Amino acid sequence: MEHKEFEELVKLASQQEALPQALEILKASDDQEVAEAAASLAGQFALAEVDGEKRVYHVTLQADEQGEEQEFVEHVMNEGDDVIRFVAWFFDAMFEVKRKDTYQAAGKTYQQAKRS
């Protein structure tokens, strides 16, 4: 995918209201790899309330060393966050594009998560 196409896709996806709409934009991408990666994520997100926040998690099953399936949960964003957080997570998780680069493509400023 050319950088201009990447920028256009990132901007379009990050302008959506919520994660499901952004995921649909990514699934409809002309880039087959992006579309397939987005389609593979369908049904893998869960919403949970933690510390008074509604958090969106990516949930997968992975085999551990003993071959037993374990649930793996990764915090993606909070409900109501700017959708660029999901878009940046998607390109980082699926294509190893740095989140900062995805934010730049969207014309947004990336802020590193604070460590506690």
Image: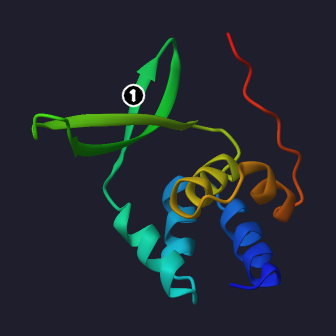
Residue 49 position by quadrant = top left
* Quarter the C terminus occupies: top right
Answer above or below: position of 52 versus 97: above
Relative horizontal placement of residue 38, taking residue 8 as reference (left or right)? left
**Residue at 82% in and 62% down:** 106
Q: Residue furthest bottom?
A: 30
Can you name the residue that lies furthest to the front here?
A: 65
Q: From the viewer's perspective, is 67 left or right of 99?
A: left
Number of marks in the rendered image: 1
Q: Residue at x 57, y 73 (%)?
A: 25
Q: Which residue is mark 1?
A: 48
Q: Position of residue 47 (x, y in %)?
A: 40, 36
Residue under the image location 48 percent in, 59 percent down: 20
Q: Establish if 110 lies above or below 34.
A: above
Give the percent coordinates (x, y) of residue 78.
57, 33
Q: 96 or 85: nearer the eye?
A: 96
Could you tell me residue 72's position as x and y percent? 32, 36
Q: Is residue 13 above or below residue 51?
A: below
- Specify the quadrant that holds the N terminus: bottom right
Q: Is residue 100 toward the left or the right of residue 36 in the image?
A: right
- Between residues 81 and 87, which one lies in front from this camera angle? 87
Q: Is residue 2 left or right of residue 64?
A: right
Q: Observer-nearest residue: 52 or 4?
A: 4
The percent position of residue 66, horizontal first and vertical second, equals 10, 34
Q: What's the residue type where badge 1 is placed? A: Ala
Q: Residue at coordinates 63% horizontally, 57% vertically from top-left?
A: 87
